[in-house]
Image: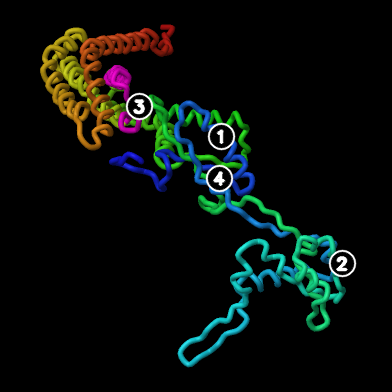
Amino acid sequence: MQPVQDLTVESRVSRTQYQYSMEDADATELATWSQQLLQKLQTVPQLRDVASDQQNNGLQANLIIDRDTASRLGILPQAIDDTLYDAFGQRQVSTMFTQLNQYHVVLEVDSQFKTTPDALKDIYVKSTSGVSSAGTTATSTASSSAPATNTSTTGTSGGSTQVPLSAFTRLEMRNAPLAINHLGQFPVVNLSFNLAPGVSLGEATKAIEQAEQEINLPRSINTSFQGTAAAFHNSLSSEPWLILAAVITVYIVLGVLYESYIHPVTILSTLPSAGVGAILALLITGNDLGVVALIGIILLIGIVKKNAIMMIDFALEAERVEHKPPEEAIYQACLLRFRPIMMTTMAALLAGLPLALGGGTGSELRHPLGITIVGGLLLSQLLTLYTTPVVYLWFDRLAQRFARYKIGNPMEEPAPEVSGD
């Protein structure tokens, strides 16, 4: 039984929810190490219901040829292969043509002689040398029936001796795979697993990678996650770059808007409080930082910075047009922009409440999105009204300090020459 998800990225159906594949060009090596890793993962406490799609418990009969005895009897390996294919293969020996159709004639033994591996004892191979095997095969055919042994020593066809197959071969039973799965061009074994209660997918992936190192998995085996686990693993690798790209894009747009390198940093200073609020909300509610929660944090970057934009925009306008000092400009901006800031914040926060508190089918997918939005807006609203003016004044004083430094160290100009009159 598996839960039905609103969004699915799995490309295959397995016994459990998450898949992990092992790929190798050598099928024998893959079968050996996949069993070792399977046994190791079954002991990992972060995983549950670890299973494999490998089906290697099939029964295979291997016919081992004693080449010395076969050579002594004048039997070539090609003759053995031809005889076995004539008996158990589908060799086409003729075609019957009629007025309306044509029929292929296939050579094979009767069905009653190919039900068990013991039927190989009734197969005879023609000797090319014509040497009788009466003396040399007495021990090898001890387990055969008396009529078969007598036939092997006396039966001839066209001057050549018919030697029983059991006189120079032995049968070995081994395990063989019923099916070999492939990923691309190479054999692959898919391991599937579920998560233990209270364990995140990130912890499970780290536990699997640790298990690989503990059993010293060969480098010739290529391992990778599939389906949902692969999407999560890829999102973790690109998550820092995604957030960095969003912040850089916002900085460039704000820098062009305000024609300044400093004031965009003042606006971006509101983002850490929003991120901390979102993570704290996820921890309090017991949700994981997944892909949907990450989307909520990206949305916060656009929602939260509007608080600082509304204050900084008004303060810069007051400084440049009304020529007010920075302290008075930012103070007046906080007073006049308080109501618009609260209105826009409450509109976004109340819009996220149905996502965070709603129920119904698929609500568990939307909960992290609403929780990150509500938690980030609450904490950022409490802090940014106080931290943004402080950061604004600090950067303004820092800019004035650099300006005074440049004015106090002008480039020296050469003194004018004085005439001697």
- Tell me where residue 269 sits by quadrant: top left
Inter-mark Cα distance, 3 to 1: 30 Å
Answer with left or right where residue 397 lies relative to residue 96.
left
Inter-mark Cα distance, 4 to 3: 30 Å
State if disc 3 and disc 4 touch (CB < 8 Å). Answer: no
Which type of secondary structure does the marked residue at label 3 adopt? loop
Inter-mark Cα distance, 4 to 2: 45 Å
Q: Is residue 325 above or below residue 377?
A: above
Q: If you read the primary sequence from the N terminus, does the residue marked by circle 2 or circle 1 appear first?
A: 1
Mark drawn on residue 72: 2
Mark drawn on residue 23: 4
**Residue sitting at 53 percent across and 89 percent down?**
97
Start-end of magenta stretch: 267-294
**Residue sitting at 18 percent across and 17 percent down?**
311
Measured as percent of width and height from the top left, residue 212 is found at 57, 32
Residue assigned mark 1 = 39
Within 10 Å of disc 4 (Cα), the crowding (few <14, some 14-19, many 20+) is: many
**Nearest-to-viewer mark from 4 and 3:** 4
In the displayed orientation, state which residue is furthest to the bottom: 99
Q: If you read the primary sequence from the N terminus, does the residue marked by circle 4 or circle 2 appear first?
A: 4
**Nearest-to-viewer mark from 1 and 4:** 1
